[in-house]
Image (cartoon, rainbow, N blue to C red):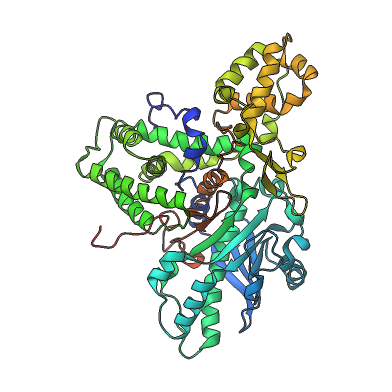
Amino acid sequence: MKLPDITAVPPRDPNVVMRLDRLGSFHQSRLSFMRILLRRLEAERWTFDRPVFDIDTRGTGRAVYTAHGPDRSYSLVAFANDLPPEKRSDRVIATEWDATFTLFDGIPTTDDLDRLQDNVPRQEAGRISERELSLSRANRSVRLWDHVVDALAAGRQPDRDKVAEVGYLMRTTAVYGSGKFGAADREVTAGRPEFQAPFQVEMLSVFLTRAFVMDLVEHMARSRAPDTAVPLDPDLRRRFGIGNSTGLGMAPFLLTHPALINSWIAAREAALARIRALPQAAPHDVAIFRRFARRARLHVDDWHSEHPVQIAKIDALRADMDAVLDKLEAADLTSNRPWDRLWLWAEDALTLEGQELMASLLMEPYPHLVDELATCMGADEAATWRIDGAMTCTDLRALTEDVYGWALAIDWTDPAAQARVWYTSEAKLEPRLGDRFNEPVEPYEQPLCPGRDAARMYTDLIASDEATVAGFLMRHPQHRHIVRRAQIAGRLPYAEIRDNTIDASVKPIDMLRMKLSFFGASHFDPRSDRWVRINMYQHAPFPHELGARSGDDWAYPFLTEAAE
């Protein structure tokens, strides 16, 4: 495969890409982890079965959903609960849930299921083993759940408008992996081809969870009215995703995994650069792009939020997509580097939301240029951690000015510039964001403000007469962490967020949005500036449909025949 010459259109400047307001406008794409997973499951012809479904008429019991790949099998073990409404909460402090899950490495025995039943429903209060790869829990969206059960039990389909308004029957409140609560460490599975891309364990767990939730709601309808109940219409069934509530616990990940974040962004930017550098576009590819633009417009129409900031962004995005569709009516997209011309127009004409949706849409016609980049999205972070003590202080000064020039321009004596403090709660060991000047949290501050720390380091650096980084750090060991970050960002251009993460105006939901977009989430609905609800796998095929329906083309709603 001959790749386009991206030297003519290089990847975007990290000073543009790595700003929080832009990161907080990212959308899912061909490089999102859900789509990477389903492409593999379909290509490798994975099969699925449900060997256990012991759920009673009250909706309590256990079930097992097993995915069989070329070399290994993995089983979602689910425990359903009849949870009283007053105990239902999305907060991390909850102790009971409507359903709890673990992804088991292999096929569990009855003894395994009994052991897991004693622990998985307790979540943090229980313990799992290295045979388990993840631990998760979910709660019903009660209003929609009851409506769907009532409708199916009465022999009719639920109201499509109500389904569209919520989009899921359960939402997870945590999907833990990588060694938490006794689960297998990342190193146990990192060498397996199916898990080399990031977060594939978690994405597989959620994919199977969605199948369980839909089976459960149909089971509850049959249990209530066995003579009249009907299953969900398959097209309507696929409109249900899995919801998720995500809070501050996810935000620091972007700062504590700089090499991994660089891999994600670099792959996305390389894909965009490859497409922009194409000298011409085939009519077939242009037709695909136009079709996806119309589908994306439908997707935006289905996006609802109660948060005023997000409402404004959605309204602006609808206007953006109308402008894109108008542009496509008359645009010549066949020659003279058409996608670069379209992109340059978008930079001037569209909001950040619109620009970043355009970046995702441009990838859709070109799987042969984009999909291989999924193999570049992991990172050996330990390999980047060593500090280069032989670097000269002159070079470190230049590097700091290049990577952190934006931070050096901030007046750090202004209280607003340091208004927030990242710390860890004692009760749940979860990240929190406090007020530096009104809460007694500063002694517990975590090093999650690279900008301020770089400015402090730079002040000492320009006053130092040491020749090398090693000599400088011998005198100023408090700067080791930021010297390490600067050197990593010098090698990996997208490793560092180039914004103030402790400013009075910082919105952690921007960090959550960026990470969740790489998961493949959609319909971001902030509930404050610190937590957000999303939808996962909406419109995707179910396990039994893979092969008959595309494991890749599902992220946007399909057009009607008239619209086609």
Q: Is residue 495 above or below residue 124?
A: above
Q: Closest to the observer: 319 or 346?
A: 319
Q: Is residue 278 above or below residue 317?
A: above
Which residue of the protein is positioned furthest toward the right in this rendering? 474
The quadrant of the rendering that contains the C terminus is: bottom left
Which residue of the protein is positioned furthest toward the bottom in this rendering? 227
Residue 281 at x, y percent in the picture: 28, 37
Q: Residue at x 76, y 66 (%)?
A: 119
Q: Residue at x 44, y 53 (%)?
A: 552
Q: Closest to the observer: 199 or 38?
A: 199
The quadrant of the rendering that contains the N terminus is: top left
Q: Closest to the observer: 386 or 188?
A: 386
State left or right for residue 140 relative to residue 353: right
Residue 214 at x, y percent in the picture: 52, 71
Q: Closest to the observer: 526 or 76?
A: 526
Q: How many marks?
A: 0
